[in-house]
């Protein structure tokens, strides 16, 4: 992914890589935070399909906005599609097509079937179990805030704030605090779980992009 606007997705998904259980010296997790996160994970797993709008916002350490982009994500089973102004990512559950519209290039790779597979689905489920220490910071106006600290200190970020809407038990936003100083926020702007998503949504159709160069890395 070459575009700066897509870097947040990489950073968000990087939290999903599996690591060891917390060393005893690091302390224990907040049971109230775990109950909330488990409820969010369970609720998401009950959906047959998901369509959601999102905003990606990048700020520096002084809270100055550097970039603000909107996009859409579609999920069904192990398939997903992420659409942004300059990029589309298609996955049919086994193959991933990353389309860089500005570079006029699509890269094709195989989806890693291991536990380390990076997908949007994992962002909404129990990615937190083995990778983080977490605690409930409190609740304001029906939004619960949970703070996650990565166990693996080599990660490029030192803290993640997850905000959860209490009434719906769904993620409202995720804010990643990067060691380099930038702040990345993924905000969910509405979610639909009622419609049926066609299988073709998750497959790259070369006929629709005749001028795009194909880089096949499978």
Image: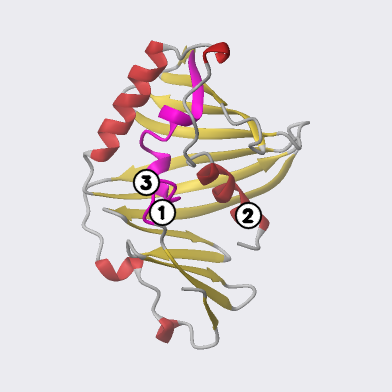
Q: Are marks 3 and 2 in contact (CB under 8 Å)?
A: no
Residue 38 in percent (x, y) is at 32, 25
Task: Please tell me the numbered disc located at residue 73.
Answer: 1
Q: Which residue occupies the foreground of this view, 134 or 101?
A: 134
Left or right, residue 184 beside residue 12: right
Q: Residues within 10 Å of mark 2 (few under 14, many from 20)?
A: many
Task: Please tell me the numbered disc located at residue 121.
Answer: 3
Marks 3, 2: nearer the viewer: 3
Residue 92 in percent (x, y) is at 33, 65
Sequence order check, earlier mark of 2 and 1: 2
Colouring rule applied to residues: secondary structure
Q: Which residues are magenta?
A: 113-136
Left or right, residue 35 beside residue 182: left
Residue labelled with disc 2: 5
SS category of the residue bearing label 2: helix
SS category of the residue bearing label 1: strand
Q: Which residue occupies the foreground of this view, 177 or 128?
A: 128
Give the vertical position of 193 relative to 36 (above or below): below
Residue at 48 percent across and 47 percent down: it is 54
Residue 160 in percent (x, y) is at 57, 29
Q: Residues within 10 Å of mark 1 (few under 14, many from 20)?
A: some
Q: Are marks 1 and 3 in contact (CB under 8 Å)?
A: no
Residue at 42 percent across and 51 percent down: it is 119
Sequence order check, earlier mark of 3 and 2: 2
């Amino acid at each position: 992914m070459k575009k700066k606007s897509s870097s947040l997705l990489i950073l968000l998904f990087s939290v999903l890589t599996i690591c060891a259980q917390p060393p005893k010296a690091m302390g224990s997790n907040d049971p109230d935070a775990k109950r909330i996160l488990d409820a969010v994970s369970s609720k998401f797993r009950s959906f047959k399909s998901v369509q959601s709008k999102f905003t990606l916002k990048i700020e520096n350490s002084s809270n100055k906005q550097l970039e603000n982009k909107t996009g859409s994500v579609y999920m069904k089973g192990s398939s997903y599609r992420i659409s942004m102004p300059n990029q589309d990512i298609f996955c049919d559950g086994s193959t991933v097509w990353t389309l860089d519209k500005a570079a006029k290039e699509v890269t094709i790779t195989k989806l890693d079937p291991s536990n380390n597979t990076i997908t949007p689905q994992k962002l909404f489920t129990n990615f937190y179990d083995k990778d983080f220490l977490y605690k409930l910071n409190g609740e304001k106006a029906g939004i619960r805030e949970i703070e996650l600290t990565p166990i693996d200190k080599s990660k490029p970020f030192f803290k993640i704030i997850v905000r959860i809407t209490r009434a719906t038990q769904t993620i409202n936003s995720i804010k990643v605090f990067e060691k380099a100083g930038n702040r990345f926020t993924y905000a969910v702007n509405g979610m639909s779980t009622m419609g049926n998503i066609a299988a073709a949504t998750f497959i790259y159709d070369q006929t629709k992009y005749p001028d795009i160069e194909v880089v096949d890395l499978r």
